[in-house]
Amino acid sequence: MRSLTLILSCCLVFAACSDVPATEPTPSVPIVTPPVAPPVLSDPNPSLPPVDIAPVPEPQPDPPMPLPLPDIRPPVVAIQVIETAVTAGDTVTVHVEAADDTAVRSVELRQGNSVLAVQVGDKLDYSLKTSTAGTLTLTAIAFDSAGNMSTSEPVLVTVAALPALPSATELAQQAISIQLPTQDGQPSVRHPDVHHFSQPWNGYEYWMAFTPYPGPERENPSIVASRDGVHWEVPTGATGSEIVTLAMTRAADYQYASDTDLVLTPANTLRVYYRTAQTKTGIAREGIWMTESSDGRAWSSPRELLTVVSAPPADKKSPYAYVLSPAVVIGPDGLWRMWSVNRYDLPGRVELRTSVDGLTWSAPIVTSYEGNVPWHPDVIYRAGQYVMLMQEATQKLMVLTSKDGISWRKEKGLEFPYFPLEYFNEAHYRSSLVPGEKPGYWDVYLSGYKSGSLDSRLVLLKNLHLTR
């Protein structure tokens, strides 16, 4: 029913439209389309003005790379030598180092015109063994990768001759006889120890401790002084040369006093150290004693610092030799050192004791001694080393050196020969070193004797080249 109604409604509408009268057609009018403006891009941020987008330029090829400048700058090179003053036989340690703005290709070391070593890279280390005296000129050359080279400033190394003793004939010719005033007027003396002052000490530049010899009654520590090291006298104002009497020694129950050693203290006083010995009871007893003076005339009462008591060895070869010949030195560190010889166990050993004041001493340590049969040493510290003049039981004198006072090296060729001079052509005894005018040179107050009578004398040998 509803469908029918809809159909009817549509028919009525159609009929109505058919009743509209027809009209004349309207002439055609051309349609003109206005030009359309290009769209304007919207700005995401309307508060900012529009941004003009520049056109992208066409890509251009990279410019050519400039050619590298040639390397014309040479390297820099230098030599470092730790020790430039050595003795023939020493080894010189050399270090070469170079630098360059690109790279160092190699370095070489030369002595004069001779090439000693070549090393790839910028460093070179070399050990140069010297053999003869003279002057060595060392240079280094460095090369870079471009072939540039440079030469270092030269370094001069002075090589001194080895220490050497004059011949026996020359020693006899240069020996200066030394006469000492003894308490009893007899000329026979031993055990000298000399100290030289650069400025006079209480009126004298040279002071000597010694003992007359032979005979236990004569062997008493004594002091003399000199202004030139040759002519000696009893110090002005002193009552005599003897500073320790036989009565003092016997009062301490010793038979004799020997082996004097002279030391200048930090308080500017002189000390004389010496050894006493007693064998009459069959028991070996020895002592180390000291007496001191501020003027060389008045001396303190002797003081026993060290006592050694021991039974004699079974072989009876050395019944009383445990602290022979004390040699006292104040080292560069301020520590007092005393070397002495212990011959209880033959062939004997060199022992070292230390002290902070020269009065109270440590227990001994055994040193490394390169000699044969030690007997009477004298020790001096000079130029960074200890120097020992040792009289061995063979009655020969020899020179030894040590950096620490413990390891002693025997210097080759420095064993004093007997020389053709009375008292010095058979045996040498305890002698004394005095620093000479030049480094490595020494004056020696040498003691010698006749083996039959034990009568002894002193000579002075000046400016001997004994150390490096």
Image (cartoon, rainbow, N blue to C red):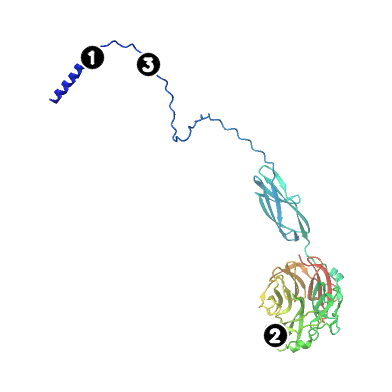
Which quadrant holds the C terminus? bottom right
Q: Which of the two labelled residues, at mark 2 and mark 1, occupies the earlier sequence position? A: 1
Under mark 1, the amino acid is Val
Where residue 206 appears, as percent x and y from the top left, is 82, 74
Q: Which of the two labelled residues, at mark 3 and mark 2, occupies the earlier sequence position? A: 3
Where residue 184 appears, as percent x and y from the top left, is 85, 85
Direction from residue 12 to residue 163 in the image, left or right: right
Q: Distance between the residues labelled 3 and 2?
A: 155 Å
Query: In the picture, residue 389 is in which quadrant?
Result: bottom right
Q: What element carries label 1?
A: loop
**Residue depicted at x 19% and y 16%:** 15
Where residue 343 appears, as percent x and y from the top left, is 70, 79
Direction from residue 464 to residue 50 in the image, left or right: left
Query: In the picture, residue 289 is in which quadrant?
Result: bottom right
Q: How far apart are marks 2 and 1 (CA)?
A: 173 Å
Q: Mark 1 points at which residue?
A: 20
For disc 3, the neighbor class at 10 Å (few under 14, some 14 to 19, many from 20) is few
Q: What element carries label 3?
A: loop
Q: How far apart are marks 3 and 1 (CA)?
A: 28 Å
Which quadrant holds the N terminus? top left
Q: Name the residue under label 3.
A: 31
